Image (cartoon, grey):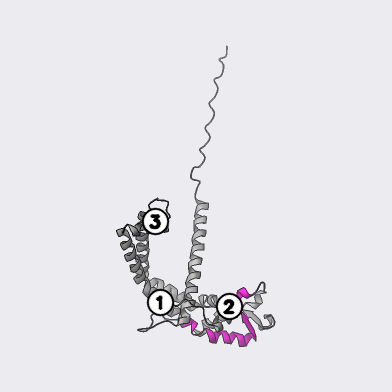
């Protein structure tokens, strides 16, 4: 299943904006909203992704193992051993008809097959929440008497009261407290789901990378120095002159 990488409809992209703030806090009826964040912060999203992670644990483990195998193959193709497989090195392997390339392609196909049920389950869960998004947004618009919603990056500066993302999330939590992760037979995602799903996955990937960096920094901070200074050796005592 391939997802068309397109943005959400103008109504969703421009129109997601509602936080749990009093209506009087809005600035001249103008609000801002992050549609993707509003969906990702829902309880249904968190529960669905956690359930998917548990359900497809074996797939994830096999994917991790396959990726390690790919890294090992890439290391063999890295002829100058600088831990950086360049296009020139790949071209040389192709020209030489290196059999490792066939293994590499096979591993990548296996990973794609293992990822397919995970992607399908995630996309189905995301779409199930997104289907209720427009109604949740309209509910917040009405409650807060909003006349205009803009994307967050449309503002150079704005008070926190303008952001209504949390309000839309709260409305979604009430409208769709949970979603399934098993789509019906022959289910295909909507075109708009593809763009939203890609945005969500990119944000999750970025967050994981940031967390990995923080974990590495924290680990380095608690580790002792690689070459701790050796304890000072006491200076040898000078012989004392004999007393006469």
- Looking at marks 2 and 3 on the same chain, the residue that comes earlier in the sequence is marked by 3
Residue bearing mark 1: 2
Tell me where residue 51 appears, x and y as whole percent.
Answer: 41, 74
Residue bearing mark 2: 166
Badge 1 marks a residue whose secondary structure is loop
Tell me if residue 144 is in the magenta stretch.
Answer: yes
Badge 2 marks a residue whose secondary structure is helix
Q: Main secondary structure of the magenta part?
A: helix
Tell me if residue 3 is in the magenta stretch.
Answer: no
Tell me where residue 231 appears, x and y as whole percent.
Answer: 52, 37
Find the distance from the CA under tag 1 to the CA under tag 3. Answer: 30 Å
Tell me where residue 237 appears, x and y as whole percent.
Answer: 54, 24
Q: Work out whether 223 lies above or below 135.
A: above
Badge 1 density bin: few <14, some 14–19, many ≥20, Cα 10 Å: few
In front: label 1 or label 2: 1
Quadrant in which residue 89 is drawn: bottom left
- Looking at marks 1 and 3 on the same chain, the residue that comes earlier in the sequence is marked by 1
Q: Residue at x 42, y 59 (%)?
A: 87
Tell me where residue 99 appears, x and y as whole percent.
Answer: 29, 59
Badge 3 marks a residue whose secondary structure is helix
In front: label 1 or label 3: 3
Residue bearing mark 3: 89
**Which of 17/169 is in front?**
17
Residue 71 visible in the current orientation: no
In the current view of this chain or complex, which residue is farthest to the left?
99
Highlighted range, magenta: 128-156
């Amino acid at each position: 299943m391939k997802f068309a990488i397109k943005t959400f409809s103008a109504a969703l992209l421009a129109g997601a904006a509602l936080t749990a703030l009093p209506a009087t806090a809005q600035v001249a009826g103008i609000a801002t909203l992050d549609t993707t964040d509003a969906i990702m912060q829902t309880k249904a999203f968190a529960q669905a992704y956690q359930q998917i992670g548990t359900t497809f644990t074996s797939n994830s483990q096999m994917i991790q193992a396959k990726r390690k195998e790919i890294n090992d193959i890439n290391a063999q193709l890295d002829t100058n051993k600088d831990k950086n497989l360049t296009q020139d090195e790949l071209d040389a392997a192709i020209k030489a008809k290196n059999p490792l390339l066939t293994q590499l392609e096979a591993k990548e196909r296996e990973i794609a097959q293992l990822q397919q049920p995970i992607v399908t389950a995630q996309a189905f869960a995301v779409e199930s929440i997104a289907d209720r998004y427009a109604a949740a947004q309209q509910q917040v618009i009405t409650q807060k008497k909003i006349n205009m919603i803009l994307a967050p990056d449309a503002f150079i500066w704005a008070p926190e009261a303008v952001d209504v993302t949390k309000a839309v999330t709260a409305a979604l939590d009430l409208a769709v407290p949970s979603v399934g992760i098993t789509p019906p037979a022959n289910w295909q995602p909507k075109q708009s789901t593809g763009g939203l799903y890609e945005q969500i996955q990119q944000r999750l990937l970025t967050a994981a990378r940031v967390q990995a960096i923080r974990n590495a920094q924290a680990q380095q901070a608690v580790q002792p120095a690689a070459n701790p200074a050796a304890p000072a050796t006491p200076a040898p005592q000078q012989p004392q002159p004999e007393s006469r």
